[in-house]
Amino acid sequence: MIGTAVLTSSFSTANSVSTYATASISPTANSVLIASLVYVVTGGATDTVAGLSLTWTERATRTISASTRITVWTAPAGASPGSGALTFTHSANGATQSGTWDVIEVTGVDDAAPVVQAVTANATSTTPTVNFAAAGNAANRMFAFIGTNSNPTTTPRPSPAWTELTDHGVDTPSCTQEVQWLSTATDTVADGTLSLSASWGIAGLEIKAASSLFPPGQIAGDRAALIRRSVW
């Protein structure tokens, strides 16, 4: 079964900085790390994530407003990830005014190709929503990362029961972030309810389960199909 844990979750209200450093983290071997950032930035268009000598891949970026955006990255932790901080750096011309970040680990996944699909959306309302394509497998899990350019709190979708992992709704006056995941089954919609209307951006990831976690019926069906083809 896919599992998840928050490794670090924090924020900064410092002005005119282009780099954030997280607290030290100690990932689980062979997990996949997901780093999500929401920040107010006065310039620049590119970002990087570095740390633990891992290879980070940008999976989704979405504009929230003229000066605010959300970006999501992943990295396989490998067999011996060690411990240390991560560093988030904006482009040379970018100077952030405030930001939030969350780093979670996901276990029980295909760490060689963990992301099945990445989807994004943005608008201004009280109901951030993004639509997935049908899940690639029932053992996979959906994650949603919601950012705003204000400071509402976010309530996850009640049915099916999305679980909130973090909520930075009261931490900074100019941007927020909430992370949620669907731990029991796949779904094609991720959404939430904001406590006030705001410009928002939402990114959704479908994370692929390790093949050993695929439903037994599916594996048996695949084997039966192979036998039929070999007989015919």
Image: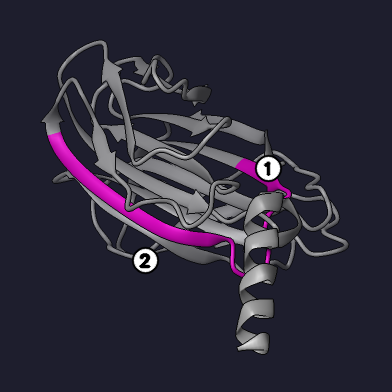
Image position of 192 (left or right of 213): left
Residue projecting furthest to the top: 195
Q: Quadrant of the N terminus?
A: top right
- Where's residue 188, x and y in %? 34, 41
Image point (47%, 40%), residue name = 186
Q: How far apart are marks 1 and 2 (CA)?
A: 38 Å
Residue 32 occupies which quadrant of the picture? bottom right
Residue 177 occupies which quadrant of the picture? top left
Image point (60%, 47%), residue name = 139
Q: Which mark lies nearer to you, 1 or 2?
A: 1
Q: Nearer the viewer, residue 131 or 175?
A: 131
Mark 1: which secondary structure? loop
Q: Which of 19 and 30 is in front in this view?
A: 30
- Where's residue 127, x and y in %? 20, 24
Image position of 119 (left or right of 33): left
**What residue is pinned by disc 1?**
2
Three-letter amino acid code at disc 1?
Ile
Q: Which of 135 and 107 is in front in this view?
A: 135
Mark 2 or mark 1, which is nearer the start of the sequence? 1
Three-letter amino acid code at disc 2?
Ala
Q: Give the range drawn in magenta.
A: 104-123
Mark 1 packing: few (<14 Cα in 10 Å), some, or many (20+)?
A: some
**What residue is pinned by disc 2?**
92
Image position of 210 (left or right of 199): right
Q: Is residue 205 above or below residue 146?
A: below
Q: Quadrant of the C terminus?
A: bottom right
118 within the magenta span: yes
Image point (57%, 66%), residue name = 56
Asked if one can make out residue 46 in the rendered structure from this viewpoint, the answer is yes
